[in-house]
Image: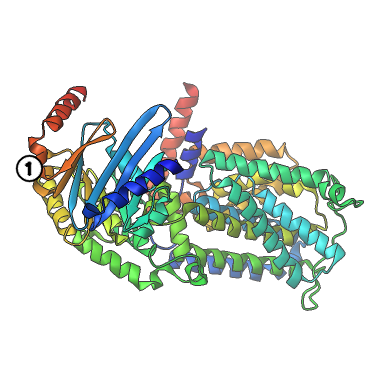
Amino acid sequence: MSSNADELERADVSQPSTSSDAILRTDGLTKRFGPLTATDNISLEIQENSITSIIGPNGAGKTTLFNLITGKYEPTDGKIVFQNESIGGKDPHQIVRHGIVRSFQITNFFTELTTIENVRLAAQARYTGFGPTDFLKHHASLEEPISDAMRVLERVQLDDVAHEPASNLSYGQRRHLEIAIALASDPDLLLMDEPTAGMSPEETNETVELIEDIATDITLIIIEHDMEIVMGISDQIAVLNNGSLLTQGAPAEIQQDERVQRAYLRGGGRD
Amino acid sequence: MQQVFDFIRRQRPSGTGNQILSSGGRLVLVLAIASLAALGPVIQSVQPFWLNLLIRMLTFALLALSLDFIFGYAGLLSFGHAAMYGAGGYVAALLITKVTASALVVLPAAIITGVITAAVIGWVSVRARGIYFAMLTLAFAQMIYIIAFTDLPAAILSMETVTGGDNGLYGIQLYELFGIDFRNRLNYYYLTLGLVALSLAGLVRLANSPFGRVLQGIRENEGRIEFIGYDVDRYKVIAFAISGGFAGLAGGLYVPFQSVANPELLHWTVSGELVVMVLLGGMGTFWGPMVGAGLVVFLEDRLGGVASWEVILGGLFVAVVIFAPRGLAGMIVAVRNDPRAALGKAIQALKNYVEAVRG
């Protein structure tokens, strides 16, 4: 592992030109589960304030890549560098503090809490720790998390249902709450796992608008299956296949790429 | 087993809301505690023995409260709460016999013992999830039981006795505090009631703190809470340690009262009874488990001689799970919200049960 990492570091030094404004870089990122290689030697660069879509057939390693970047899995090999700091192998809560946050494909929030309390709880993480006041004060006496939560809810247009139990929300609203919880952590980089999955065309349009709005100040990496959306919103597209990075490029380049078309035809047959 | 555990974990009567207790609920609790205080002298003049029973009920209410904080509120099923209770009790017994009977020294020491015991058990156990956490806490509690039962510390320290082995430590004298005579049961009753009330107020405060909200988040969705920036294991260990402190206090209160510290304090049936008390009362409400504890101790005292107590307790547990899975608190909340619907549901549950039994 160490000799391998050294080689990678030397490799970085030899080609610094492209990485000047990369906010996130993975070098030879590999995750093996026993005999299965889920991601194989993935080297990606994500530019600051861009939207990068990760596409590829099912089982290509997209979600594993998210799990590696957000700390759910420890890399078997390779490096993850975020804002010039190595974050590979850190715990999820530490990575959130670094400024990387994810939203989930399935709605994954706190169903017994109200909408605003879901978001407030996420915002609270930035203001609290284990000091005496964190145990003794009433949570509502901390004003910043509440005002942050309200701002985020306005942004995702859930402010009118702020005090409803989250379990009462419609499907589309739930997906927006999912995004709101992620935004409440004030991330620099947001990873979205299929933000439009299962949505009606109308809801999809709203969500795409929301994504474009978020992208004005946050770098985005999105796993998305809808090619129309991918081609419409992405600055960069990374194509994964069988755990490897097939290619990375602008939408127009990807559309022309024969390998991508072949991978998709094969993947489509397998689905 | 895991499904059973998940089912039990979901049975909480109160749902949403940003408060552990509504302001109306708080008022009822304050009134309840005030009435208990006012009733003290009356009970003493009518039937002094009942004060002993009330002190026992209050002690177990404190223990059930301690368990409810970690189990009902934070979602971690501890099946070893006797460990902290017993550890607090033994330390109180040793301090009183060897060092001082001052409540201002011994009770804080019992609390700290509970905190340290729980912190150690918690630190090792929180990495395990769900039912495995419960099993680990049970294993630790059994270890401590064996240590006390076989008087392992005496063997290690080459002393004649430390824990008193299976006989335990006898003749523990009562506390000294501002010259109050605790041989008068009424005074001990007030000491216990006061500390139980303070503990309840403290835990309600804690539950509503930023820390407490994270615990609730862990209960609701442990998988998500770490992805919004919280160190889940650390929160769990601290919550477990806090809960252990209250269990240690209960032990420190109870041992001088019954003047004995023996391995029975640490027996796994204590932990088991506590879980039943919390479920019977309605987990996650704080007041429900306290009522549940009082009820169980009362029934044990009244019915313990009629039939084997374990059979009665087991029957009670089965009845609660079938007819009132959300416990007494759930029943009360349901009746208050909509009495007719609650009655209809109860009848339906009974019908379903009868049909199921008939096949």
The residue lying at 29 percent from left, 64 percent from top is A149
Chain letter, disc 1 residue: A
Q: Is residue A112 left or right of residue B167?
A: left
Q: Residues within 10 Å of mark 1 (few under 14, many from 20)?
A: few
Q: Is residue B280 left or right of residue B349?
A: right
Q: Is residue A149 above or below residue B311?
A: below
Which colour style is shown? rainbow
Residue B49 visible in the displayed image: no
Q: Is residue A58 left or right of residue A216?
A: right
Which image quadrant is residue A118 in? bottom left
Q: Is residue A254 left or right of residue B223?
A: left
Which x, y percent locates residue A225? 17, 38
* Amino acid at the residue labelled 1: Ala
Q: Is residue A115 above or below residue B300?
A: below
Which x, y percent locates residue B124? 60, 47
Give SS at disc 1.
helix
Identify residue for label 1. Answer: A252
Residue A31 visible in the displayed image: yes
Which x, y percent locates residue B246? 63, 60
In front: A13, or B152?
A13
